[in-house]
Image (cartoon, grey):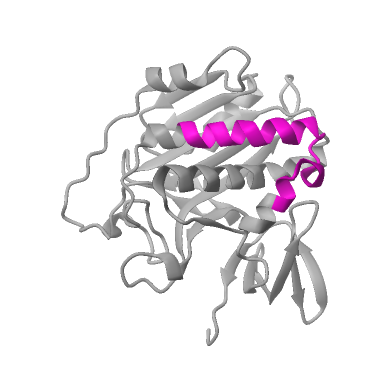
Amino acid sequence: MVTEDKPVPRPLLDVAALESALVRPGGMWSRIEVVPEVGSTNTELVVRAQQGAPHGTVLVTEHQTAGRGRLGRGFSTPPRAALTFSLLVRPNVPTERLSWLSGLMGVAAVGAVRRISGAKVVLKWPNDLLVPAELRTGTNHVDGKVAGILAEVDLSSEEGPGAIVGMGVNVSQNRLELPVDSATSLLEEGADVDREALLAAVLGEFEELYTVWVASGGDAEASGLASIYRDLCVTIGRQVRVHLPGDKTMSGTATGVDTQARLLVRGPGGVRALSVGDVVHVRPGD
């Protein structure tokens, strides 16, 4: 674990280097834009999508001041301490299969973070990246959230249906800069990570998975995406408490993730398929 008073270098992203590495003929990424500050990269990219921004647009910010999480929760991070970005894709697949795009990003992010940082991250449904409690550094006894993902479908553009997938990865925050005890950063877990290398790795993994998924018509089972996601998702098999919209909760056992990326929870009333919710992994005695 890092100390709170030790200064951490936080260089600006090099947009020219990113475009040189990621924007290429025949590739998926059409433009990489880095802005100094924005409220939410997802919100900004939704507007650009509605104005006709092309498939493969990536918007990155050095400082996100009004990020949006699940169930409308807000958050912010110190400048240049996180990798915060959103991407726009316009896949030619049935609209109902777009629900797998956040899962696709989750799988891509796990692969990239493991490769670049060595951190032993896993997925919590729907798409948080965690360092499990038993694998964390120091004396932490809770799972540490290192990244979150939010996907939104846009059907209003003349360019056709699209989806915006955003992610924020805690890279160099120290303990005092993290909002809650259950949050962590790659630096807190012992990894000094270059944000440019991490972004390139995530987008590379995403492109590879996305190409196969689209070629399969967005079928997560046929493309193998669903199987990989289930293997990485530690929510499956756990006792959970799910906070649902409208201040409702459901408790039970997470038994799986179905073909529509919904979490299957067996509770007192039987098995229910959940498409949205904030999951708490319940430990014995909680």
Residue drawn where x is 27% and y is 59% of the image? 176
Residue 30 in view (yes/no): yes
Q: How many marks?
A: 0
Which quadrant of the view contains residue 27? Answer: top right
Which quadrant of the view contains residue 54? Answer: top right
Query: In the rendered view, would you say 107 is above or below 28?
Result: below
Task: Give left or right: position of 219 versus 121.
Answer: right
Query: In the rendered view, would you say 187 is above or below 165?
Result: below
Q: Name the dominant secondary structure of the magenta segment.
A: helix
Membership of 248 in magenta stretch: no
Task: Give left or right: position of 222 versus 106.
Answer: right
Front residue (pair 88, 17): 17
Query: In the rendered view, would you say 63 is above or below 140?
Result: above
Q: Position of residue 262 (x, y in %)?
A: 74, 57
Front residue (pair 261, 269): 261
Residue drawn where x is 81% and y is 72% of the image? 271
Membership of 219 in magenta stretch: yes
In the image, farthest residue toward the bottom: 285
Task: Give left or right: position of 142 versus 122.
Answer: left
Front residue (pair 115, 196): 115
Q: Position of residue 279 (x, y in %)?
A: 60, 66
Residue drawn where x is 38% and y is 43% of the image? 82
Give the residues drawn in magenta, as a range.
200-227
Q: Position of residue 1 (x, y in %)?
A: 27, 60
Residue 247 in view (yes/no): no
